[in-house]
Image (cartoon, rainbow, N blue to C red):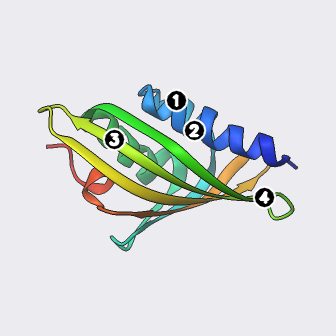
Amino acid sequence: MLNRNQLIELVEKRYFNVMDQGRLDDTLACLASDCVWHIYPAGKVLKGRDGEIRDAFANAMARYETMWHGNFEWTVDEAAQRVAASFDVRLVDNAGKETELSNVKLFQVEDGHFTRLDLYFSTTEAIVSDPN
């Protein structure tokens, strides 16, 4: 079982920071193989770290030249191994268009990996659109 600081480090340093560096495999290493990701308000459900979730991350990383996640606010339930993160996002796509978002993401952790992600964001196009 991870303590509060370890849970925050998993989410911020090992997940968001490596995502912002475009390191797909390292980002996905934080997820359990059977992870399920619910994306709101799009109503999308992505299943499987190595399937639909990998594709969504790969598309986003291909689409955005720059990604930044920061200004985190944390709510941690250590006993339940759950983390809620409120944060800001800045994205710059390959055409130079900048997008700013305010998101909330909920993480369920088992054995040091995310088994469920719930993302609430101000727009869905940043993650679920096709990069073409």
Query: Which of marks 2 and 3 precedes in the sequence?
Result: 2
Check disc 1 and report its element: helix, strand or loop. helix
Local secondary structure at mark 3: strand
Callout 4: 10 Å neighbours few (<14), some, many (20+)?
A: some
Reading the image, the residue beneath label 1 is: 18
Q: Nearer the viewer, mark 3 or mark 2?
A: 3
Tell me the CA gap for discs 4 and 1. Answer: 21 Å
Residues marked 1 and 2 touching at CB (< 8 Å) = yes
- The answer for how far apart the CA atoms under marks 3 and 2 are is 16 Å
Judge by depth and name the residue closer to the eye, 19 or 86. Answer: 86
Quickly name the residue at label 3.
Answer: 90
Label 3 or label 1, whichever lies nearer to me, is 3
Q: Is residue 29 visible?
A: no
**Closer to the N terminus: mark 3 or mark 4?**
4
Tell me residue 12's x, y (percent): 61, 39
* Numbered tag placed on residue 81 in the rendering: 4
* Residue type at numbered disc 4: Gln
Q: Which mark is residue 15?
A: 2
Which residue occupies the foreground of this view, 98 or 25?
98
In the image, what residue type sits under mark 2? Tyr
Q: Is residue 38 visible?
A: yes
- Expressed as whole percent of the image width and height from the top left, the position of residue 128 reads 30, 56
Question: Three-letter amino acid code at disc 3?
Answer: Arg
Whether residue 42 sits left or right of residue 81 in the image: it is: left
Q: Is residue 27 left or right of residue 46?
A: right
